[in-house]
Amino acid sequence: MNLFKKLLSTKHGIIGAQKYCRATFCSILHSAVDHSVEVHSPDQEVVIALGSNVGDRLNNFNQALQLMRKSGIHITKHGCLYETAPAYVTDQPRFLNSAVRAVTKLGPHELLGVLKTIERNMGRSGGIRYGPRPIDLDILFYGKYQIGSDKLTVPHERIRERPFVMAPLMDLLGLVIDSDTVACWHSLSTDSDGLFGLWDKLGGESLIGKEGMKRVLPIRNHLWEWSKKTSVMGILNLTPDSFSDGGKFVSVQNAVSHVRSMISEGADIIDIGAQSTRPMASRISAEEELDRLIPVLEAVLEMPEMEEKLVSVDTFYSDVASEAVKKGAHLVNDVSAGQLDPNMLKMVASLDVPYIAMHMRGDPTTMQSRDNLQYSDVCSQVASELFSRVKDAELSGVPAWRIILDPGIGFSKKTEHNLDILTGLPVIRSEIAKRSLAASHAPLLIGPSRKRFLGEICNRPAAGERDPATIASVTAGIFGGANIVRVHNVRDNVDAVKVCDAMLKERSIQL
């Protein structure tokens, strides 16, 4: 006989923030009424863990997620992606691990059957327990239910001993409890401090980055451990009207020469844009943008110097993103985070490349309007609006582990707003963490390079004279947690980045 124990919500409702959780998890558990029930609710929120260490691990994840969606499992959130050392049976390849939150109408044993079918169809056989497998799908939580049967135990019985399960599980939560169901997941953990307490007891964030567990972003057929060093993105504008270097690199020859120079100076990424997004810039069509972009993109990708480097395409058009990735671009950099082309998010999901989602209100012609410059708390509001864009992207099929966030310095911001953001990157991360720990862990990109606010502060009307101010801004950003800096002057900023990284490394050693 199957036994389902439903944990009823407390009479006080949902706890609003993590600081209240510790006082209430235990009371939720103790006040719950245990009784046998049948699961007839039309929709249940579930958590499913994913693991793979055989074959193309990332492709296995993508295939499993597609099959889950086709089987009535609607994925709403993704954890970060982790490469982990094998547990229990240690003589086997390293794993990729993550987890997803989803909504389904399937009953718990129906869901288990669907997941086992997916595993079999993807080549998993009996084999050694805890041994190699192309895909492993485990139900961690099912609604508000505690399930015990000969086939299924929920919550999963080994959650509390597995950092490679707990890390992506925590990513699916926010520091603010967002539903009765999540409150019950905390109470089901049997720890007085809930899931947060379990994670802390295992070691928490201190485990990430060590040899046994790395948080990674998949790009160009490898896993990028982006937090190890700050990356420098060099800007290549192919537009005749960009605010800093408009018209300088519109020819293929000049563009290639400039890329060669930026690579020799230490750029890790080349960001190619063929549409101006300066304030009041006129929008060109996707066709015209492609005409400017593709000849240069093809020439850049053929350069021997680009073998170990990355190329991003700066566009808000889905058709441009699609064509650029087909030609070989490795990232899509969208200043609108999907707001200026309704097809962008679905397109990015299908392209399987990292997606840079930037904060902007309106479009380049309206972003500096009076309404779009209204903030009561710029860091909090940018965080909230960025999280909304991440949520839209995830619901469209873009996993959180492919998203890079950009707070949009100079876009829909006054000078004081830009300064608040540069000094408030930790605040932005912490505000996002209230809603999604996965999104709060995403790489942060900043792009203050030669922006107008620097000219206003330093009385430098010419954009080319703002490089020292850019270096100061980049330095502040790196110390605030920026992982990627987008700049015009690569040489000087690479030096600044090296010094900042060395200082951060020395501080971490001392700690």
Image (cartoon, helix red, strand yellow):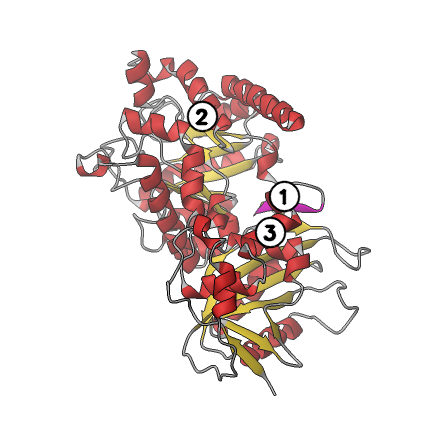
- Write down the region rendered in magenta: 212-218
Quadrant (top left, top right, bottom left, bottom right) of the N terminus: bottom right
From the image, tell me which residue sits under label 2. Answer: 487
Q: Earlier in the sequence, mark 1 or mark 2?
A: 1
Q: 448 or 49, which lies in front?
A: 49
**Can the viewer see residue 238 in this picture?**
yes
Q: Quadrant of residue 381?
A: top left
Q: Earlier in the sequence, mark 3 or mark 1?
A: 3
Give the spatial CA distance, label 1 vs label 2: 29 Å
Name the residue rendered at 28%, 31% in the picture: 413
Q: 497 or 329, which lies in front?
A: 497
Residue 196 position (above or below residue 236): below
- The mark closer to the camera, 3 or 2, is 3
Residue type at numbered disc 1: Ile
Q: Earlier in the sequence, mark 3 or mark 2?
A: 3
Residue 307 position (above or below residue 45): above
Name the residue rendered at 44%, 52% in the picture: 20
